[in-house]
């Protein structure tokens, strides 16, 4: 509203027409100070720039310049490196030892199950009278051999040879003096009953495995 009044006053002043709001006479002289006071108040008001907002006081501390942090030199001393290498060497030695023991135990288990399989095959083929022959297993420290007939023949091409892992040692204790376990027709019994032991020389951490052969021809792995 005040803006419209100002525009009207400017228009009248330019046109030369007297206005009751600017005439300082006896009639309208009382309005002049009023109008002038209005203009004075309007002109005294501070101008607010568009798009400017005052920054809150609570956020100012975050914009303070921080002190520069001096560069830190990082590294390891010779003693720290030697300690780390010693710990690493101990860990590697433990892992290698555990892995070696595991592979030895697996080799021992494989040797025992392999010989047991040959014994079971010899007995089953004897009971089946395969080829009209008896079957047996010949034992030695490095392995076992499945053969046909009442006695073991080294050069028989039909022999099935099982060679044990070099880390495994086979020993046996059978009734009689021979190293052959031969099964009988019809009953599957044997006169060469006893035990067959599988061990790891130089390593007592792995227990021995034993196959027990009974006179009836049955086998058990322990």
Image (cartoon, rainbow, N blue to C red):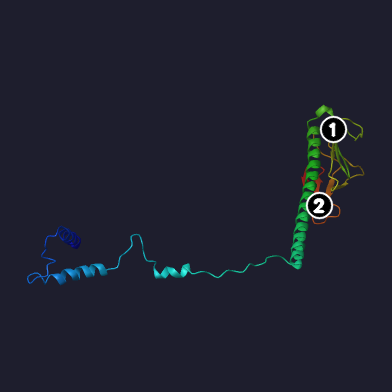
- Residue 81, position as x, y percentages in the image: 75, 64
In the image, residue 86 sits, relative to residue 168, either above or below, namely below
Quickly name the residue at label 2: 208
The residue sitting at 74% across, 63% down in the picture is: 84
Picture quadrant where residue 162 is located = top right
For label 1, the crowd category at 10 Å Cα-Cα, with few meaning under 14, some 14 to 19 and many 20 or more, is many
**Residue found farthest to the left:** 27
For label 2, the crowd category at 10 Å Cα-Cα, with few meaning under 14, some 14 to 19 and many 20 or more, is some
Dot 1: what SS? loop
Picture quadrant where residue 151 is located = top right
Dot 2: what SS? loop
Give the label on residue 142, or none: none
In the foreground, 60 or 105: 60
In the foreground, 111 or 139: 111
The answer, for residue 161, to whether it is visible in the render is yes
**Residue found farthest to the top:** 131
The residue sitting at 15% across, 57% down in the picture is: 15
In the image, residue 36 sits, relative to residue 8, either above or below, namely below
Quickly name the residue at label 1: 134
């Amino acid at each position: 509203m005040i803006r419209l009044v100002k525009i009207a006053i400017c228009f009248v002043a330019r046109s030369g027409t007297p206005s009751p709001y600017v005439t300082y006479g006896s009639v309208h002289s009382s309005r002049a100070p009023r109008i002038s006071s209005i203009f004075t108040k309007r002109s005294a008001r501070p101008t607010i720039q568009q798009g400017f907002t005052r920054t809150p006081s609570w956020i100012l501390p975050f914009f303070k310049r921080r002190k520069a942090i001096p560069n830190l030199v990082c590294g390891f001393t010779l003693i720290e490196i030697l300690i780390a290498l010693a710990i690493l060497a101990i860990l590697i030695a433990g892992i290698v030892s555990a892995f070696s023991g595991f592979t030895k135990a697996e080799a021992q288990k494989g040797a025992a199950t392999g010989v047991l399989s040959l014994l079971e095959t010899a007995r089953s083929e004897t009971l089946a009278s395969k080829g009209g022959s008896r079957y047996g297993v010949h034992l030695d420290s490095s392995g076992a051999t499945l053969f046909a007939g009442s006695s073991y023949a080294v050069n028989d091409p039909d022999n099935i040879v099982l060679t044990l892992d070099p880390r495994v040692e086979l020993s046996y204790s059978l009734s009689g003096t021979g190293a052959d376990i031969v099964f009988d027709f019809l009953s599957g019994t044997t006169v060469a009953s006893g035990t067959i032991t599988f061990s790891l020389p130089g390593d007592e951490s792995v227990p021995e495995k034993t196959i027990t052969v009974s006179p009836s021809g049955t086998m058990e792995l322990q």
